[in-house]
Image (cartoon, grey):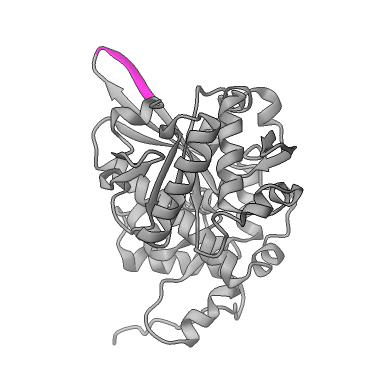
Amino acid sequence: MTATRQSHPRFRRVGTAPRVELTDDDKAILECIYRHRFVRADDLFRLFENRSKDKLSRRLMLLYRGGFLDRPIAQIDRFRAGGSQALVYGLDSAGARFLKETASAPTGRTNWKARNRSFTRERLDHTLAISRFLIDLEVACRLRKGVSLLHADEVILSAPEVTRRLAHPLRWPVSVEFNGIRGEVHIIPDAMFGLRIARENAPAVRSYFFLEIDRGAMTIAPAKRVQESDAFLHRATILRKLVAYAESWRQNLHKQHFNIATARVLTLTTSENRAAFMRRVAEEVVVRRLNIPAGLFLFGIQKEEDPLAVDFQDGAGRTTRLLTEDAYRLNP
């Protein structure tokens, strides 16, 4: 007689939590989810391709039932709407304790379940867009000899000690002056990553990027009266982000904060028209008026494909890719 696999609720644990002996693969899964905050199961299938989808799916269920992983409730309406959807996983308390005890990640004393439940559908979708791009990038690097992805935590390992000790090292203040208005703006990129390319008989080349994922809701450029008032520095707009990144580059804060020569700003948005409008604003308002290298900025749309094979446009409308030579210097 064939054994019937027991079915469990998707978003509710029932019965006694199973005893789980964590494997090296389990640890890698927990570290991956901690790094990205939330990850779709289908992205985990791509990252851990040495495991069959069926076996990995059962393992994720076991880690969920054991309290190592959580399934944020903000995704529930996806399933109520019907259709096949990949489950989304985040870290839960037992997983956070394990990573802290093994010195794999500084998970702190956060109540992970409460933190997961505080995420709205909008915030969850934004976080998943970030993790999807970074996982696309990691998979793309694996397919190329001599190319490797540097995650933000790996970049920060080489940062000055004062940065490494910060609770939020991917956050730094920038003094900004725009249209005669002065103030301080904090930059908080959605993610940071580096690309490392090995070369024969020469040191490896590295380039760094700040990632901004735009979901189409933020104002790109406010009205002229706003740009010329104190309100400009206090309203979240794409233009304010570009100005802040430009000033960070001008003041050499990338070197001071991260110990890297420079980093380009890669902005991904929802449509070609929106990307084109952002690029024009960058060229007309930031590049020309503030005399900033056009190569500092890259614009494109969100695509679920190989990011290293995608054409992006810089602040002057030139087409480039992440692995071209332009990625390692800033064009005037």
Q: How many marks?
A: 0
> In front: 164, or 235?
235
Mark yes or no: residue 4 visible.
Answer: yes
Left or right, 195 with respect to 291, comes to: left
x and y, in percent, of residue 328 in the image: 37, 26
Name the quarter where the C terminus is drawn. Answer: top left
Work out which residue is located at the far front of the displayed protein and give it.
Answer: 225
Name the quarter where the N terminus is drawn. Answer: bottom left
Left or right, 114 with respect to 32, comes to: right
- Tell me what residue is drawn at x 55 percent, y 49 percent: 190
As displayed, is residue 100 above or below residue 82? above
x and y, in percent, of residue 58 in the image: 41, 69
x and y, in percent, of residue 45 in the image: 35, 60
As displayed, is residue 212 above or below residue 262? below
x and y, in percent, of residue 186 in the image: 69, 41
- Tell me what residue is drawn at x 29 percent, y 13 percent: 202
Q: Would you identify the image quadrant in which residue 95 lies?
A: bottom right
Left or right, 181 with respect to 250, comes to: right
> In front: 304, or 4?
304
- Tell me what residue is drawn at x 56 percent, y 78 percent: 11
Mark yes or no: residue 9 visible.
Answer: no
- Tell me what residue is drawn at x 49 percent, y 87 percent: 80
Main SS of the magenta part reads strand
Q: Is residue 95 magenta?
A: no
As displayed, is residue 9 above or below residue 151? below
As displayed, is residue 330 above or below residue 66? above
> In front: 310, or 284?
284
Q: Which residues are magenta?
A: 201-205
> In front: 227, or 64?
227
